[in-house]
């Protein structure tokens, strides 16, 4: 069996830690003793118990981002969905009278403070075999602290609790390591189309330019 395109990135132990939503910085550790000799990382968002998952060449994948990111920015992200999960989100939004972006935010646990408007959807095909981490969303907290010059009232905190015990709220996600490397987008993906989920009529197919 040929090696996955992103095998080296997937094999890096940090990739699973990122999939788990771990904070990697030393300042983001919880001390288990007064001397800091035993610590655990803060976990916020990410997946519950990520498992290795092989994506076959030609599989269509979908990613939500901000319209301002454009296709190039969207393809740099590591979090993706397969068609079955996209259909689940679409059904949820339709049944509950919510926007698709709201469904993604709630079911995939993406606080608005993390910066993504979730109003832009891109579709790609896997350029070859890809390795990913797959799992259910973990609860997440987003905190926004206004910079100098912005009113203090702009501060916000959003807590989204994962409800994986409810089938209608359970959406497995994919984390594909290596998407931020220079040239990764063209190596990993073949662009298919884009859709601005709010304010646009239909898919746009083409070069992504």
Image (cartoon, helix red, strand yellow):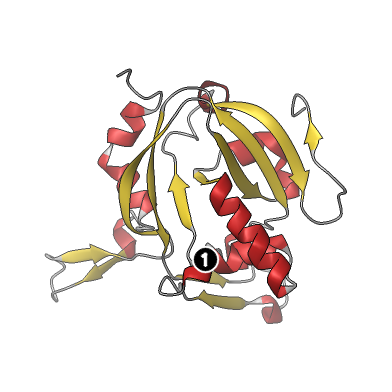
Image height of 99 relative to 186, above or below: below
The single residue placed furthest to the top in the displayed view is 2
At horizontal 72% and vertical 49% (from top left) the residue drawn is 120
Q: Quick one: 182 or 150, which is closer to the camera?
A: 182
Q: Is residue 35 left or right of residue 97?
A: left
Residue 70 visible, this orientation: yes
Image-quadrant location for residue 206: top right
Image height of 207 relative to 52, above or below: above
At horizontal 26% and vertical 42% (from top left) the residue drawn is 13
User: Disc 1 marks which residue?
Assistant: 109
Can you say which quadrant of the picture contains the N terminus?
top left
Residue 149 visible, this orientation: no
The single residue placed furthest to the bottom in the displayed view is 153
Q: Is residue 168 left or right of residue 132?
A: right
Q: Could you classify mark 1 by the number of other residues whose Cα lies within 10 Å: few (under 14), some (14-19), or many (20 or more)?
A: many
At horizontal 44% and vertical 39% (from top left) the residue drawn is 176
Image height of 90 relative to 122, above or below: below
Where is residue 207 shown, x and y percent of the image? 75, 24
Can you say which quadrant of the picture contains the C terminus?
top right
Where is residue 62 shown, x and y percent of the image? 60, 43
Number of residue marks: 1
Q: Quick one: 60 or 36, which is closer to the camera?
A: 60
Where is residue 71 shown, x and y percent of the image? 69, 36
Where is residue 26 shown, x and y percent of the image? 29, 57
Image height of 73 relative to 208, above or below: below
Image-quadrant location for residue 155: bottom right
Q: Helix or strand or loop: what does disc 1 sit on?
A: loop
Image-quadrant location for residue 99: bottom right
At horizontal 19% and vertical 65% (from top left) the residue drawn is 39
């Amino acid at each position: 069996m040929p090696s996955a395109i992103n095998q080296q990135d997937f094999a890096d132990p940090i990739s699973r830690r990122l999939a788990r939503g771990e904070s990697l910085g030393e300042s983001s550790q919880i001390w288990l003793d007064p001397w800091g000799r035993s610590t655990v990382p803060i976990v916020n968002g990410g997946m519950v118990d990520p498992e290795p998952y092989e994506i076959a060449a030609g599989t269509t994948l979908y990613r939500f981002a901000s319209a301002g990111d454009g296709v190039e920015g969207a393809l740099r992200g590591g979090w993706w969905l397969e068609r079955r999960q996209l259909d689940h989100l679409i059904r949820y939004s339709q049944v509950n009278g919510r926007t698709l972006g709201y469904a993604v935010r709630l079911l995939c646990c993406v606080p608005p403070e993390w910066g993504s408007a979730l109003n832009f959807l891109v579709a790609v095909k896997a350029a070859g075999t890809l390795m990913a981490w797959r799992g259910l969303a973990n609860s997440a907290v987003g905190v926004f602290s206004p910079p100098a010059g912005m009113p203090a009232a702009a501060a916000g905190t959003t807590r989204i609790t994962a409800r994986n015990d409810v089938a209608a709220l359970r959406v497995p996600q994919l984390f594909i390591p290596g998407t931020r490397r220079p040239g990764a987008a063209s190596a990993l993906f073949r662009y298919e189309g884009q859709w601005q989920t709010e304010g646009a009529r239909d898919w746009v197919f083409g070069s992504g330019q």
